[in-house]
Image: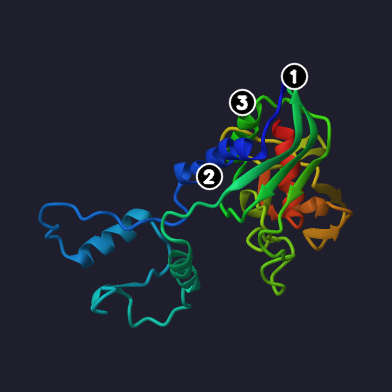
């Protein structure tokens, strides 16, 4: 059986599936909750704030201030006179800009493009995974795209599998003054997966270790070949990074692994290839 699969028809189904999934997990931009009927709690705001901190079991000093956005009146404050490093609040400016420019109903999408006909489940052409800047795309949601692809009647691809990430500029890392191995400082582009982090895990096996580099979700834990890890007999550094040909080459000091199972997240420097590799493994 030969099916002519139009680009518009396939994109409508696939993009809609992954787009709505972004809201199924958690909205990228939340709307203001509706006011509830009935009187507000008579419990003092201060008591509520202290109770929240106590329930969270936070250690150290916790300071905050809550103000009325319209009047500027301070409604509650904790340790307001205590000098402390400021929290990372610049993201609030980014959120306000996004609300103004994109709107509160905007949803980032990840698309699939096809070029060719589908003949008995075989795509006689290329398949393209195109990222459009979704910062929350994870392995489980990427798997939803592979399922949608099969539901569209495509089980094999005769042509090339390509990735596109030029919807946003690419950066090798967020800040160049941070350590190489910290997971909060990965590369970024228009196609990002799992916040551009790879999960490194080690398991003692006698005198050696079993190592895995994975892109875990709640349902799937595919290995990835874009990031590699080797054990090296050295004192320092604990982690060392070398940029390979389209892959991240990591090494870890043997003595730092200890004698028990352990794991940590590491940054990804080839995010689009990482997402494409995981997508391929999920199919």
- The local secondary structure at tag 1 comes to loop
First reached walking from the N terminus: tag 2 or tag 1: 2
Residue found at x 71% / y 61%: 187
- The local secondary structure at tag 3 comes to helix
Residue 183 image offset from top left, x and y in percent:
66, 58
Residue identifier under label 2: 19
First reached walking from the N terminus: tag 1 or tag 3: 1
Residue 224 falls left or right of residue 27: right
What is the crowding at mark 3: few (fewer than 14 residues within 10 Å), some, or many (at least 20)?
Answer: few
Residue 230 falls left or right of residue 29: right
Residue identifier under label 3: 151
Q: Is residue 105 visible?
A: yes
Q: Is residue 159 above or below residue 247?
A: above
Residue 166 image offset from top left, x and y in percent:
71, 59
- Kindly report the distance in space between the C-alpha atoms of the residues bearing marks 2 and 3: 17 Å
The C terminus - image quarter = top right
Residue identifier under label 1: 120
Occupied quadrant, residue 240 = bottom right
**Residue that sits furthest to the top in the current view:** 1
Residue 1 image offset from top left, x and y in percent:
73, 16
Nearest to viewer (mark 1 / mark 3): 1
Nearest to viewer (mark 2 / mark 1): 1
First reached walking from the N terminus: tag 2 or tag 3: 2
User: Are circles 1 and 3 on residues that touch, CB within 8 Å?
Assistant: no
User: Are circles 2 and 3 on residues that touch, CB within 8 Å?
Assistant: no
Residue found at x 26% / y 75%: 70
Residue found at x 38% / y 69%: 62
């Amino acid at each position: 059986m030969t099916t002519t699969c139009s680009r518009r028809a396939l994109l409508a189904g696939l993009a809609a599936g992954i787009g709505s999934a972004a809201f199924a997990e958690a909205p990228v931009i939340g709307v203001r909750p509706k006011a509830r009927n009935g009187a507000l709690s008579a419990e003092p705001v201060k008591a509520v704030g202290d109770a929240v901190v106590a329930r969270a079991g936070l250690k150290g000093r916790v300071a905050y201030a809550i103000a009325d956005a319209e009047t500027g009146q301070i409604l509650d404050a904790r340790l307001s006179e205590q000098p402390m490093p400021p929290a990372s609040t610049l993201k609030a400016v980014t959120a306000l800009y996004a609300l103004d420019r994109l709107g509160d109903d905007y949803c980032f999408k990840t698309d699939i493009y096809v070029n060719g006909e589908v003949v008995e489940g075989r795509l006689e052409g290329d398949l393209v995974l195109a990222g459009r800047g979704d910062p929350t795309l994870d392995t489980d949601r990427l798997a939803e795209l592979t399922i949608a692809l099969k539901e569209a009647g495509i089980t094999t691809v005769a042509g090339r599998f390509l990735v596109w990430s030029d919807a946003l500029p690419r950066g090798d890392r967020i800040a160049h003054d941070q350590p190489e191995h910290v997971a909060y400082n990965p590369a970024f582009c228009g196609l990002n997966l799992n916040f551009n982090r790879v999960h490194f895990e080690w398991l003692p096996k006698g005198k050696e270790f079993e190592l895995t580099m994975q892109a875990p979700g709640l349902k799937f834990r595919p290995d990835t070949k874009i990031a590699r890890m080797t054990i090296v007999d050295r004192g320092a550094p604990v982690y060392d990074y070398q940029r390979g040909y389209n892959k991240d080459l990591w090494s870890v000091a043997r003595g730092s692994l200890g004698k028990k199972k352990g794991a940590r997240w590491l940054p990804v420097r080839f995010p689009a290839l990482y997402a494409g590799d995981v997508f391929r493994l999920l199919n």
